[in-house]
Amino acid sequence: MAGAFNMDLGDSALSSGYTTVRVRLLCADKITLMKRTHTLLLLLVLCASTSSAQVTNGGFENWTGQVPDGWSNNNIAPLNLYPVSQSTDAHSGAFAARGEVLFASGSPVPPALQNLSQAVTSQPSAFTGWYKFSPASSGDQMTVSITLLDAGSAPVAVAFTLITAAQSSYAQFDVAIDYNLGNPNPPATATISFGIAGAAGLPTQGSWFVVDDLALTAGTGIEEQGFAALRIGAPYPVPATSILNLPLEAANSTGIVLSVLDAAGRELVLVPTGSIGTGAQTLAIPISELGAGSYVLRVATPEEQQHRAFLISH
């Protein structure tokens, strides 16, 4: 082990393919086999390669008031505060979901749109959907995240992305799901979250997004993901109490950013950017200020990002 690197957490479409097959049929009678050739066009849906799973009310067609059925948000009806609302600006169908940063009690109020109990019956490889985004300032970012949980509510896989560029017409997001958390159990449920964050602190009033037509894309297997130049081991101890150790081996010196996410994919702590040298080393991360439970550590370099699950017990 080359050394320790200390960081302070405190202040700081269904897709379908079609194959055309020409088949020769051999027809016979009782006496003589007479060959006749028939050309058949067979349309085979290649569900074994890719398919998509339905997200509950993923098209946002069904609403109760200003809450999409199967979802939750941070609207406060008594205050007439609706950061999340029904939109007729839909990618398909009649409706979509809109989130906008409002202003209340002297502070911006960003939207929080969540599905906290999405059933999962396969191992999806990506989370997809269609969106528009209008940041009111250059630092505002649309956040998209999904966390897959096993039957015991422990994280199995995660996907997270930040969208920074304005998008005035519908575009598709396609976020690969990372299964490199060290939990081999099959996923049973998922939590899905959309929001708007500022580059440093709260976002700006007036930033908004619209999302529609969400799906989980499933494949025949889960491809291992990882860094070409950075190998990351399993965090220890299990469970951790005050310090979480993360072993890694870097082929080159690089910048690194650590983020702690909760089981719903919400970013709880963003560790200030640091750098690591080449070789094997261990990052010692203080976690005493976090409560007991399951978390996900996101490790990002300028090239890629990985995730590792860990437990805290006090």
Image: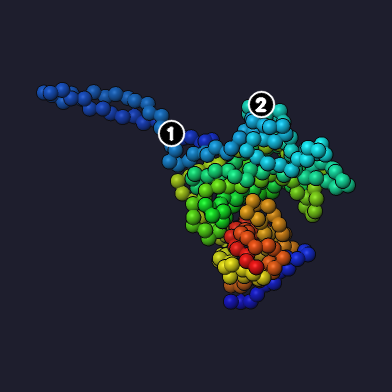
- 291 over 32 or under it: above or below: below
Report which residue position mark 1 lands on. 45
Q: Split into 4 quadrants, where in the image is the N terminus?
A: bottom right
Q: Can you give x and y, in whole percent of width and height, for residue 182 in the image? A: 53, 60
Q: Can you give x and y, in whole percent of width and height, for residue 116 in the image? A: 63, 45
SS category of the residue bearing label 2? loop
In terms of image quadrants, where is residue 171? top right
| Disc on res. 94 | 2
In terms of image quadrants, where is residue 290? bottom right
| Residue reaching furthest to the left | 31
* Residue type marked 2: Ala
* Residue type marked 1: Val
- 203 over 302 or under it: above or below: above
Residue drawn at x 80%, y 53% as measured from the top left: 201
Please report contact status of discs 1 and 2: CB closer than 8 Å, yes or no. Answer: no
Residue drawn at x 67%, y 59% as measured from the top left: 260
- 214 over 300 or under it: above or below: above
Q: Can you give x and y, in whole percent of width and height, for residue 224 in the image? A: 51, 55
The answer to whether residue 13 is visible is yes
Residue drawn at x 60%, y 62% as measured from the top left: 310
Residue drawn at x 67%, y 29% as measured from the top left: 95
SS category of the residue bearing label 1? loop
**Inter-mark Cα distance, 1 to 2:** 28 Å
| Residue reaching furthest to the front | 78
Q: Split into 4 quadrants, where in the image is the C terminus?
A: bottom right
Mark 1 or mark 2: name the one nearer the start of the chain: 1
Tell me how many marks there are.
2
Q: Residues within 10 Å of mark 2 (few under 14, many from 20)?
A: some
Q: Residues within 10 Å of mark 1 (few under 14, many from 20)?
A: some
